[in-house]
Structure formats: C-alpha cells, structure tokens
Image (tube, rainbow, N blue to C red):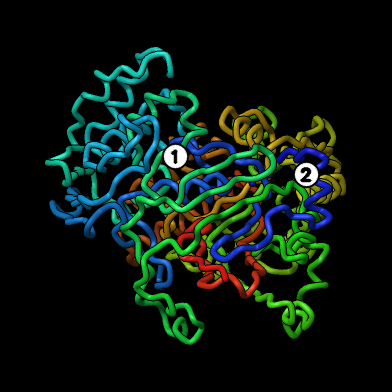
Amino acid sequence: MKSRISFPPLAVSLALLCGCNPYPHQKNVYRGALSSNLKTFDPAQASDSYSNQCQFQIFECLYEYKYLARPYDVQPCLASSLPEVGDSGRTYTIHLRSDVEFQDDKCFPGGKGRRVTAQDFIYSVKRMTDVRTQTFGWWIFDGKVRGLDAFREASEQLPPLPDSMHPALYDREVEGLRALDDTTVQIELTRPYPYFKYILAMPYAAIIPHEAVEFYGEEFMNHPVGTGPFVLKEWRRGLRLVFERNPKYHHGFYPTQGEPGDSAAGLLADAGKPLPFLDRAEFYIYEETQPMWLNFLRGNLDRSGIPKDNYSQAITAQGLRPDLVQKGIQAHRMQELDISYICFNMDDSVFARDRKLRQAMQLAYDVETVIERFYNGLGIRAQSPVPPGLFGYDSTFRDPYCRFDPGAARKLLAEDGHPGGAGLPELSYLTVAGTDARQRGEHFVQNMADIGVRVKVESCTWPEYLERLRRKKFQLVGSSWSADYPDPENFLQLLYGPNAPPGENNASYSNPEYDSLYRRMAVMSDSPERLSIIQRMKSIVAEDCPWILISHRTTEILAYDRVHNIKSHPILEAPLKYYRVD
C-alpha cells in the first residue's frame, strides 16, 4: 500500500539546509523524515505509507506485529489474547483488555478519555464499511463478514457525510459482528480466511471512539484520538509533525524474545520494560532528498535513506564508509516484502483491448538500469506480483515479457498494427513530484520512444496522486505495494476484479479465470494445491500484462548509534515506541 510533497516556507527551508535546527538534540527525542506531506490521520482513509507511519503512533488495533520475532506474526495489542477460532475457521471470539483508555481529548465529557470497549471495535468496523467514508480499505472486509456487505449497501441510501451521521444505521445489528459483552467480540466469517488475524492488525482496523468522529466531523482527519503510545502535539503542513508521549499509555512492553542474534546485537537490552521510551518524536517533511541527506549528515535527523546520487559517498564494496562509522552511523539493510510496477488503466480506450501493446511496453522497459540507477543496484527484477519471502514466490518463474528486448517489442507493435508506434496517441505517465520520480519518468519516456511510443510525464502532489488513482484519472501510473500482512493473497488481491477503484486494483483489471482462482486461493491454507493455483494466476497475469513489472526492492537505511532497538521490519511502519534515544 504504499509516497511525496509541497515545499516548506523559504525561511524554514534555509534554516534546515544550514543545519540551524532550533531544537538541539535531547535524550529520548527522535527525529525522522518523511518524503511527502501527510494526507490524513483518519484510519479509514490512510492508504499510504506516510499516513500509516504517523497514524501508527496514535491508533492501535486488536493485534499488532511482533517486533523482533521472525517469521512475521501477530500478538495481542488491545485484545488480551489471540482469537479463539471455531466452526472450522469461521468464528473468531476475541477478548479485549479492560484497562485501556482513549487519550484525553475535548471530544469526551470533561476532556477525559474513557475506557475502550468491544462496542468501539464494532463502531470502527461499521464506520469503515460505511460507503460514505470513501475508504480505500473496504477490500479487507469485503465479502468476509456475515451481514457486513448488507450494512454497506444500506449506507448507500443515506445522505453524504458529515451532514448526517444517521446513528440508526450504526445501531443496526450485523449478523457476523457482535459484542457479547463489554470486553468480548465475536466475528462470524462467510468462509474461513486463514490470514484473517492479520486483517485485524491492519491500520484500517484501528479502533476509534465515536465521540471524536461526531465532535470533529470532517476535521477528524486532522484531530486523531486513539489509545497509542503518542498523541499529536503539532502538525505544520508541509514542514513537520510532532508527537509526545501519551501519559495514559500503560499496556505496552518491550519484547522479551527475538530471533538468534538479537541479544548479541543489543536488541534485548530493554526486554520487558514499559513502552514508549521516547518523550517526543518529530517527523520533518522533505520533498527533495538532498536537504534530507544534508540534515542527516549534520546530525539533525536520526535516520535517513541514502539518495541515489550519494550512495557511493556512503557505501563501498567493503561496507559503510569509515568516516560515517566514526560519526556513529550504522547501516541497516532489509529485503522488502513489496513490488514496484507501472500500472496500465485497463479502462482506458488505448489499453483496454490491446494486450500486444502492453506486452511490447513491458519488453521495451530497461528495468535493470532502473534498479542500478535509481535503487542503488539493490533489489530483484520482478517476474510476478508475489515477492521473495512469501509462500508462492518461485525464483525460477519467468514472465516471458519481463526482459529488456526492444527488438521483440518492435515486432509485437508491428504485429499489432502499430509499426514504429504508428497510429498511437501520445500517452500520459502519472507520477509524484520530486527529482527521483521525475528522472524515473524520463527514463521510461526514453525507453518507450526507442520503440516509437510517445509518452509525456505528468507530475502531481501525493494527495492529488492518490485521488487520481481513486477516480481512475490516468493512463499509466508509477506505483508500488508493500505488504500489509505476510500472505501472497495481499499481493494477488491487487488484480482481483471486484477490488477496482476505489479499491486497490488500480489497473481495473478483470479476468474471470483469475478472479475465480483468487476466490479459491484466498480461503486456503498453504499447500501444494494452493501453490499450483498461485502459479496459474501468475501465468495469467504474465500474458495479460496489466502491469509493467519492475522490482522487489531492498532498503538500506542509515541511523546514528544514539538510536537503540532499530530492527527493520517490512510491515511495521516506523515502530517508534520501541526506539530509545541517548
């Protein structure tokens, strides 16, 4: 799910570039960077990694990912235990903690946050289901919970939000979603979904209080009220966000177990201690990578990615450069659970029925150069949507069009009746503002020009980018997806027909055989039969080519050794509650 935006005021930009940070480093204060303006704090709307990073500091779910343990799995958060699963995987009974309260906020009587109950989970799911919230996240529950789809259909008949909340709708019972008492939730699924416990750890499933939504209305997106380790202290759009410790947070503890090597790496030194360690966390917005990099080198930021133009200044064949090591900088590398790609709008008249054109454009794209030039040579050329590390990934699988072969691309265009691109209109490639994104777009334009296909780059802000995806206002768009949970279904659902926008199938791709196989695969546990179905789905995608596949990326992050307890996790977004800063 999972990217970029506006310039901060000039005076502030100059101060940051010069390293004149008005807030000198203090103990237990963390400073990080975002490469885009934040879109929203509303869990129903937070579909991008930047919003998720910030949202995770404030909101919590019934379950959360274990920080140190591998393979990836969940543990109780607002729940008091793992779910009791019955009826052959169709019924989940979940007990909630009785000692967690929402943060203090003026939306509550007397400004004092109240205790979280099972009804808060029911309300949060219903609100996310309500079609009027225009959520990107309906796909996580679509067709899965008995009676929930009927609730969504009922919401379509109501006036738009926020003019009327229609409490009668939210009082309506949903057959498969019940609060048995104040601390017990029971969920009845339409079919067994082995990965459903991961759904309950997703940002879309965060628990929110109805008082905050009713009090703030449309402004709830700017006034988050949750149970998490931090509260939002300041949000200066385009510049920075500041979080401070939530004094009512008492239910989190640093893990006591990890994987081999964690203890030797110092990752268990804080085992069992109450969280969070930080008193304050700050995120600074950098649309361009160079100001971010300079501020990191000057010590104004605790953590940073490595811009492609500076990679050789930081990393050599022997590892991190000695001068950076002497400054107390450490490198952290992680194989992402992700896929980057260029998406065709399959509803667009140019691409809808022209499979050979799509195949030709895949053949014409020099992905190896993209990985070398823009990803610092880190990453694996993608051959299917399923990344390494997940069931269904096959290192021997080859998409016949995922190779750089301009000659074969020209031949396909000629067979398609477009020799040298004749008869094709100029196409539009949508991307986000920023130097790197623009340069990647220019590389794509040049590759396509080499086979006679004319493309222009269209840049926009990150919020506008997301809105255009939702409304299908593009022809081609650069995109990527990072795992919400460690199951191949999370990637294969990106091409499931019913998940078309505003869902996550941005291509609006639809293939009856693929959709039928998806529905079978989604309810199966890992097995040879499931693997066979996944292989067939990958073959269908290879022939239909709704995406130009690029890579599964490897991330390299630098951080100062004053920040303790950093362990890369491809699903957890900025797990600041575990960090400690000296």
Q: Relative to 364, is 198 on the left or the right?
A: left
Residue placed at 35% from the left, 14% from the top? 157
Q: Is residue 2 visible?
A: no
Identified by mark 2, the residue type is Val
Question: Residue 505: x, y in percent?
Answer: 52, 40
Residue placed at 64% from the left, 46% from the top? 3
The tag earlier along the polypeptide, 2 or 1, is 2
Residue placed at 18% from the left, 52% from the top? 95
Relative to 332, residue 302 above or below: above
Relative to 161, residue 224 above or below: below
**Residue closest to the eye, 52 or 347:** 52
Question: Residue 65: x, y in percent?
Answer: 39, 61
Question: Residue 60: x, y in percent?
Answer: 37, 49
**Residue closest to the eye, 410 or 271:** 271
Residue placed at 77% from the left, 80% from the top? 321
Q: Relative to 374, is 334 on the left or the right?
A: left
Quick one: label 1, few (<14), some, or many (20+) residues within 10 Å? many
Q: Determine whether the residue tagged by mark 2 lies in a helix, strand or loop.
A: helix
**Residue closest to the eye, 347 or 262:** 262
| Residue 362 badge | none
Question: Residue 545: x, y in percent?
Answer: 61, 47
Relative to 466, residue 311 above or below: below
Identified by mark 1, the residue type is Pro
Rounded to the nearest whole Å, what is the CA distance between mark 2 and mark 1?
30 Å
Task: Return the residue at label 2.
Answer: 12
Relative to 537, residue 135 above or below: above
Q: Determine whether the residue tagged by mark 1 lies in a helix, strand or loop.
A: loop
Task: Return the residue at label 1.
Answer: 43
Q: Is residue 369 visible?
A: yes
Give the foreground label among 2 and 1.
Answer: 2
